[in-house]
Amino acid sequence: MELALTPLEFARRTRRLHPQREAVVDRGLRLTYEEFFDRCDRWSAALQSMGVAKGDRVAYIAPNTHAQLESFYAVPQLGAVLVPVNFRLTADDFVYIVNHSGAKVVCVHADQLEAVDSVRDRMPGVERFVALEDPSPGWEDYEALVADSSPDYTAPTIVETDLLTINYTSGTTARPKGVMITHRNAYMNSVGTLLHLRMDIGDRYLWTLPMFHANGWTYTWTVTAAGATHVCLPAMDPARAFELVRDEQVTWLCAAPTVLIMLSNASESQRGEVPSGVHVVTAGASPASDTIERLEDGFGWTVTHVYGLTETTPFITVCEPRPEHRELDTGERGRLKARQGVELITSGELRVVDEQGEEVPWDGETVGQITVRGNVVMAGYYKDSEATAKAMGNGWFGTGDAAVVHPDGYTEIQDRLKDVIISGGENISSVEVEGVLLRHPAVLEAAVVGVPHERWGETPLATVVLHEGATATEAEIIAFARENLAHFKAPTQVAFTEQLPKTATGKIQKFVLRGGASAVTRQ
């Protein structure tokens, strides 16, 4: 009898082989795998008693805690679909995602209870609201429900094409799209990760990457598959991260370039004694080679660059080291490590193609779009057949990323075909930000692009044209944006100009604006 390719198989195996091995560390809480999976079973039974059945959606709005980690097992083993929501979004964003996904139950961390409380009446389809910590009036208590529940639940038959999660990503549109990830997708990404990034029994993984972000790059399951330990970090703080690396003997972590910058530039008082031998996986905007050098030469850590999208579960490529790379000097090695790399063994096929769909030569110069097909490509966008057909209607998923392929087969992104800004590992829609800026009474036109930022990798630069006779300052525009957007989406720079650079057909030439504030005339 065949078994479905599902990350739930990792749980079954680790539960059988490593019941007494430490599974989770979350502040003062320590759980063995036996205890962890018992809690997952109890929460599954509790959800089942609430009427959650196969195919139902359960949304979570939470940082990296044991309760959030439990959702990646307790919800899928019911055949239900997990919706991990970016907790940094606004209350309006929560409303859209919860309603669009059709979530029956919403589980919320204490830090987001007030925001969700303010919009609960706008979520008519939600039947139960559960507080993961410190419940306030009107909220059910997660820990009490887990404690009071039996671990017995009725397990449905899972097939590998069943939906596992719906992960919402802003992409380039104002409204986030729900990326449908199957059990097979996640299983294959985890296996490929373990093949290329060899975590072992007894390793200890620090959760510096948000679990909601592409399912923590599937490390929510990968760590368990390895029989390793999850060390939770609810909020990224360099001093606390270094403390956990030392005290918990951390051997692995994943981080967007912004976190790498925070760690590499931390003061001596924040760092303390830095243990060597930590393996770091990074993705998002390409990490600066000098950041890689500081981590590898300064800390004695090993940095591996991977590339992917939420739509690809997420890993498509890994910048795997080769023996000949060891012979290079530090600077050249850092430059190579900043490339996106080569296909994972399990991810499927990657091609960089020109506008006619022909593969570009491997000359390191000819630019094309990265396209992929295979085991990790999403099932589609939830309730959006038009966007699904546009992205993958020809059997290949078009990433929208422009890249070259070097003679050694390593892919390197040159720019984004779409106007997505990647700031601190988060996607920001320039269209969404522009829409907010245009609501400012003084703004006539607005264009938003990403420009380099030392800490965040990229940051939004807004270039605006004011109405004739109107006045506004940079601080006023930024404050207006922060009032109407999640703060990480707001521009950090504003340039004022009499007219935006445009083509003859009226299209804004954003490549001009990417030159920064100095590329336009300031008032």
Image: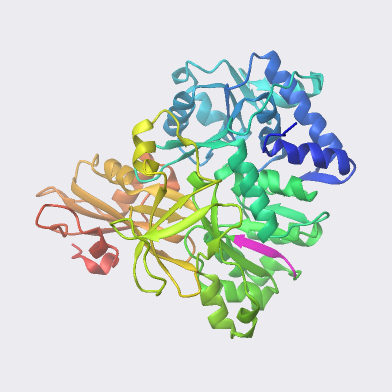
Residue range corresponding to the magenta coloring: 277-281
Query: From the viewer's perspective, is 359 left or right of 495?
Result: right
- Against 182, residue 290 (above or below) is below
Q: Quadrant of the C terminus?
A: bottom left
**Residue at figure coordinates x 36%, y 74% from the top left:** 365
Across and down, in percent, residue 332 comes to 53, 82
Tell which of 46 and 322 is nearer to you: 322
Depicted 514 relative to depicted 31: above or below: below
Which residue sits at x=28%, y=68%?
515
Res 343 quadrant in image: bottom right
Estimate the x, y position of residue 405 in percent, counting from the top left.
43, 69
How would you classify the magenta stretch by its main secondary structure?
Answer: strand
Q: Where residue 420 sits: x, y (%)?
A: 37, 52
Classify residue 235 as left or right of residue 459. right
- Identify which residue is drawn at 20% across, 64% down: 522
Residue 32 appears anywhere in the view: no
In the rendered image, the residue lying farthest to the front is 1
The colour mode here is rainbow
> Is residue 278 one of those drawn in magenta?
yes
Q: Quadrant of residue 215?
A: top right
Give the left or right position of residue 250, taking residue 491 as reference.
Answer: right
Instruction: Tell me, yes or no, whether the highlighted magenta stretch contains residue 271.
Output: no
Looking at the picture, tell me which residue is in the foreground, 316 or 501. Answer: 316
Residue nearer the viewer, 440 or 450:
450
